[in-house]
Image (spheres, rainbow, N blue to C red):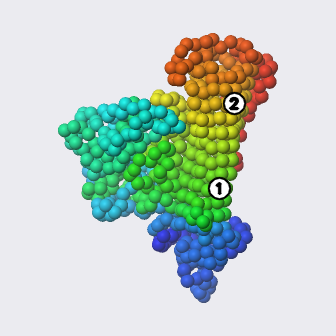
Amino acid sequence: MKRCFRFAAGLCVVIGVWASGGAAGETWYVAPDGRDAWSGKAAQPNAAKTDGPMATLSAAVEGARRSGAGQPREIVVAEGEYYLDGPVTLDGRDSGLVIRGAKGGRVVLYGGRRITGWLPDGDGMYAAPLPEVKRGEWDFRALVVNGRLCPRARLPEEGTFTHTSEFNVSWMSTTGGGWQRKPAAEELTTMTYRPEDIGAWFDAANAEVTVYHMWDESMVGAAAIDRENHSITFSSPTGHPPGAFGVKKYVLWNLRQGMTRAGQWHLDRTAGKVVYKPLPGEDMAAATVLAPTMDYILRIRGAADRPAENITIEGLKLSVTSTPLIAGGFGAGRFDGAVDVSNARDCKLVDLEIFNVAGQGIKASGPGLEVRGCHIHDTGACGLKFSSDGAQITDNHIHHIGRIYPSAIGLQCGGRNFRVSHNAIHDTPYSAVTGGGTDNLYEYNVMYHAMQELHDGAGIYIFGGNGVVIRNNYIRDIVDTGGYGASAYYLDEQCEGCTVEGNLSVGVARPSHNHMAKGNTLRNNVFIVDGDATLTWPRSSEYTFEKNIVRATGSITFTNFDGITTFRDNVLYSGTGKIVGQKMSRYSPEGDVTVKGESGNVLSDPLLTEYRTGRVRVDADSPALKLGIEMIDVSSAGPRGSR
């Protein structure tokens, strides 16, 4: 039988099997039958009950600190479910510390509390009283029921409403300074709507609004509604004005009228209760319902003059966090991670599972970061967001992110000389991977089902990269849903000296997009499209495109064909026989030229015999072999081994 204990700003620890993992240095243990007055040096109490493990993680951390920063020290946590009263924060005094879940055990840290006292609330719904919510002391945007991150009450039930706000100002590009005119405060806090969409049921005290932009969105609260002028005033500014980019979509959340499906919930701040509509057969008397009480669970935060160094967190599972009601910005980047790291150096996050959280899974900064073997899924914002020189991001599985904020990115990268390899990233509303920086490497990653909701992104999207190498990756099955489109490999503004080689793209209509970029090379890639294929170079120049295979059942179009300086030794095959190079003036087409079989280019079937597995093979008579195009094998892309 398992027993669970709560203690201040720490963990409840469940009796289990201990294992220290063989780390050098001293080890502290925390146990439900321990006492903070004990030494913490033994896993179990002695026969006389005079010494044994400590009772709280905070006491164990303090004990480890007394050994001196930088010394090898370890805290071992046993199997079980841990409900935290507050986040756990480590700093420079904890340098050298390892916090490890006992090997073979399931150690789960929850950043929230259980909700009980459910009673029928009409219309097949149940409610539980939350007096702290009514007093304005507690607010949250996530609810976990029986292990599911549940969808909130939503209007409309599917799709979006169309608002009537206008913002007819030109976007000058990110590097061009953004908006030609800075938006006024009123433009960022007001939205006009069609009267047929919002009725008398609209409750500003509870309503939250997602205003869609192009590559991000803003979720904000409603401060007031003006029914005569059909306008809503927001409680905080949006990231871009409603109507910017010509996008006029919005969604309403957290209103009882949006409870149209089983499994949904809403937080009634006025009445001070949380309301849930059970799934068929779900017994609320027996259900495990968790609501977050914090925005992060475990934080490593050093100081500028004393960074936290060589701290390792390993073998833990973290779940249930919330976010504040503010616009999250690009990639929902303003929100904390369940694991949040800053002013840190050479820290390691290994074999963690992070799930059912409203913010980021992991948000980390500081040189020498290692994130390895982590499983991050069902997050409201990004899976992993990092900024680190020399980082090693390997063998992670990231999926079903952006459950609350659709601009969320599976893996958002920043820094220099980092390596992102053997990760699997899929089911994302925006880009699977974004990055930039200098001399960074992306290799043997697999991505699919990205760009499911927003636009102007990709499987791998690079902004302002210099000397970035993208090689031996496999991106497949990304559907363009409109707007500025979706791509497999995307080099955006000011990318220069980057190389995209040995990659496979299958089922992406625009396998390569290049915008305001210069002097980059696409070499020995295989791009396969069922339908029309488009490869684009608007406002780009001095590109090399060589030894690639492009096969489409429809036409093939190279936009701004003049942006390619070297175009040779490619195999291009269009099922319709139409292969054109489109001339452009900035973003305006100015006629087509027919791409011919010259400079070693061959316009015929590459005779592919295998590619879906990631192992590309061709018939012995393929023109690709005659051109010296190397057969690529990305079948090993994604995490290695089992977790």
Residue 11 position in % (x across, y down): 52, 69
Identified at 52% across, 57% down, the residue is: 338
Residue 552 position in % (x across, y down): 62, 20
Location of residue 289 (image quadrant)? bottom left
Query: From mark 2 to mark 1, how far is it between C-alphas?
Result: 29 Å
Residue 521 image label: 2
Residue 506 position in % (x across, y down): 62, 29
Identified at 62% across, 20% down, the residue is: 561
Q: Secondary structure at mark 2?
A: strand
Above or below: residue 261 compared with residue 477: below
Above or below: residue 384 compared with residue 291: above
Identified at 63% across, 44% down, the residue is: 437
Q: Amino acid at mark 1?
A: Pro
Q: Foreground: 258 or 194?
A: 194
Visible residue check, residue 161: yes
Visible residue check, residue 253: no
Judged left or right of residue 311, residue 108 is left
Q: Secondary structure at mark 1?
A: loop
Query: What residue does disc 1 label?
Result: 367
